[in-house]
Amino acid sequence: MSSKTKIVVLHVKELIYTGIFAVLGILFIILLIIMFLPKNEKESAVSTMTQTATNTYVPGVYTTSLILNDNVVEIEVTVDEKNINSIRLVNLDEAVTTMYPLIQPSFEDLANQIIENQSLEGITYSDDSKYTSMILLNAITASLEKAIDAEADTTSEISEEADTVRE
């Protein structure tokens, strides 16, 4: 009977390294899955934009502040009951236009499209100014939401007054 005994030598250092790399590999795979899963944020943004297109506004001038490197740029939206009359940048400093050269042309393009369509649906922008346009579009959306929210507040105040009169 010839039995050959095999001796296996395991180094603790190699086992520790293998365990660490296995854990890091698993964490990396989980991170990739989390990063590339689709998010539901786009659906809420689309519903806000369609909501803005169908509602009427309280006439007035609504502003939203946009802070860029300690400089405040205000986006001013003027609306009447059914129309968006004008959208303009207020307090646009030379330092901002120097640091962000795409802000002025991107804003003018967005403003022209919004005033022409009278809604936030179907807005297009170039890939060169994608992020600048997204920031500006979010600020314009916030201003228009103020116009819609003001209508809701006015309606609730009127209904509260009617309730007190009935009592």
Image (cartoon, helix red, strand yellow):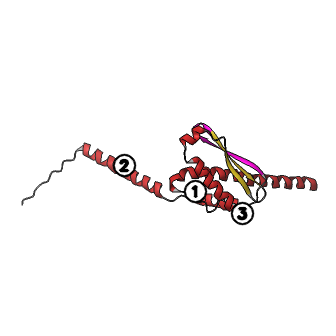
Can the viewer see residue 71 in this picture? yes
Type of amino acid at the residue the image marks with label 1: Glu
Q: How far apart are marks 3 and 1 (CA)?
A: 21 Å
* Helix, strand or loop at mark 2: helix
* Position in image of residue 57 (x %, y %): 76, 56
Type of amino acid at the residue the image marks with label 3: Thr
In the picture of the structure, the residue carrying the numbered disc 1 is 41
Say which residue appears at 15% left-offset and 51% top-offset: 7
Label 1: few (<14), some or many (≥20) within 10 Å?
few
| Camera-side mark, 3 or 1 | 3
Say which residue appears at 68% left-offset and 46% top-offset: 64
Can the viewer see residue 51 in this picture? no
Type of amino acid at the residue the image marks with label 2: Leu
Query: Is residue 24 shown in magenta?
Result: no
Disc 1 to disc 2: CB gap under 8 Å: no
* Helix, strand or loop at mark 1: helix
Task: Locate the C terminus by quadrant.
Answer: bottom right
Residue 167 or 153: which is nearer the viewer? Answer: 153
Question: What range of the chain is rendered magenta?
Answer: 60-71
Task: Please name the predominant secondary structure of the magenta segment in the image.
Answer: strand
Q: How far apart are marks 2 and 3 (CA)?
A: 50 Å
- Along the horizontal axis of the image, is 83 left or right of 137? right
In the picture of the structure, the residue carrying the numbered disc 2 is 24
Say which residue appears at 59% left-offset and 36% top-offset: 70
* Position in image of residue 12 (x %, y %): 25, 43
* Position in image of residue 129 (x %, y %): 53, 52
Marked residue nearer the N-terminal end (1 or 2): 2
Residue 54 bears which disc, if any? 3
| Camera-side mark, 1 or 2 | 1
Marked residue nearer the N-terminal end (2 or 3): 2
Residue 106 or 134: which is nearer the viewer? Answer: 106
* Helix, strand or loop at mark 3: helix
